[in-house]
Amino acid sequence: PALYPYQTVLNGEQGFQTEMTYLFPRGSILGGKYGTNLAVNFAYAGSLYKEPIPKTDTLNYVQNGYNTEWFKQGQINYYQDFNIEVKKKINKDLKVIATYYNMIYNFATLQDGVKDETLLTDPEARDNLFINAGVIEIQYKLSNRHFLRSEIQGLFVTQDKGADVADNRGDLAMVLVEYSISPHWSFGLQDIYNFGNPDPDRRLHYPLGSVTYVQGTTRVQLTYGRQQQGIFCVGGVCRVVPPSNGVALSVTTNF
């Protein structure tokens, strides 16, 4: 899901977010021995409501803009994210987190920079992507200092009828295994398979191995493998990366 992040639209936007969390208590049917956490989140970002003012040129005075109304929903949806997360502790060593995402991503605005005026006059240019994704994360405590974490992800993408999004990567699947020795070392191995790419030549595997060492506020990471373009997260740290194939060394520190 991090491949489709939202970024602020500089020509004006409005939005809201709401979240509800609930703890099923211990001993209940859904809570079990340790309780169960449920979180439901909804976020929306869209254009300002706009009534375009026709261009005029009277005595060299040019009027060009729009009228709007406070808090009235705009005509263009930039981004929408609905997700449900369930956290369940199975026993003292095993914890499972399951998340479902349903997103609408306006590729024309957020990636191609198409202005509202164009989309208002030509709705077919909106190029919305509709995304469904599921993530299952399993955390297992081997001992006081040794931890094992695994993730399985699936992402499925459709788009507006007739739209042509050149950078639509299609459906993806990911498997990740991380082994950590607290408080310094972490070893990771993952593979992302772009099995649903519209271009058959780009239905690639992206295997990647990593070794991470943390000392205080300094973090050193060595990776080897094939990396796709986008937002990449390891050990809870996320950053934007270019496509690459080979060895990479990163050092992050705070002082």
Image (cartoon, rainbow, N blue to C red):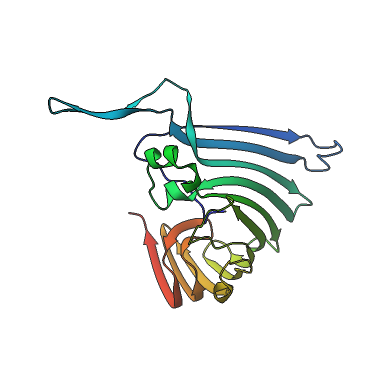
- Residue at 46% across, 22% down: 71
Q: x, y percentage for residue 4?
A: 51, 53
- Residue at 43% across, 28% down: 49
Q: Which residue lies furthest to the top in this view?
A: 70
**Residue 194 vertical position relative to residue 98 in the rendered view, above or below:** below
Residue 30 vs residue 207, the one in the foreground: 207
Q: x, y percentage for residue 187?
A: 57, 70
Question: If the image is split into quadrants, where does the C terminus sit?
Answer: bottom left
Residue 110 vs residue 34, the one in the foreground: 110
Left of 149 or right of it: where is 252? left
Left of 243 or right of it: where is 91? right
Q: x, y percentage for residue 70?
A: 42, 20
**Residue 6 vertical position relative to residue 45 in the rendered view, above or below:** below
Picture quadrant of residue 68: top left
Residue 17 vs residue 251, the one in the foreground: 17
- Residue at 42% across, 74% down: 248
Q: Residue furthest bottom?
A: 246
Residue 96 vs residue 181, the one in the foreground: 96
- Residue at 73% across, 35% down: 23
Residue 64 is at least partly visible in this image = no
Picture quadrant of residue 172: bottom right
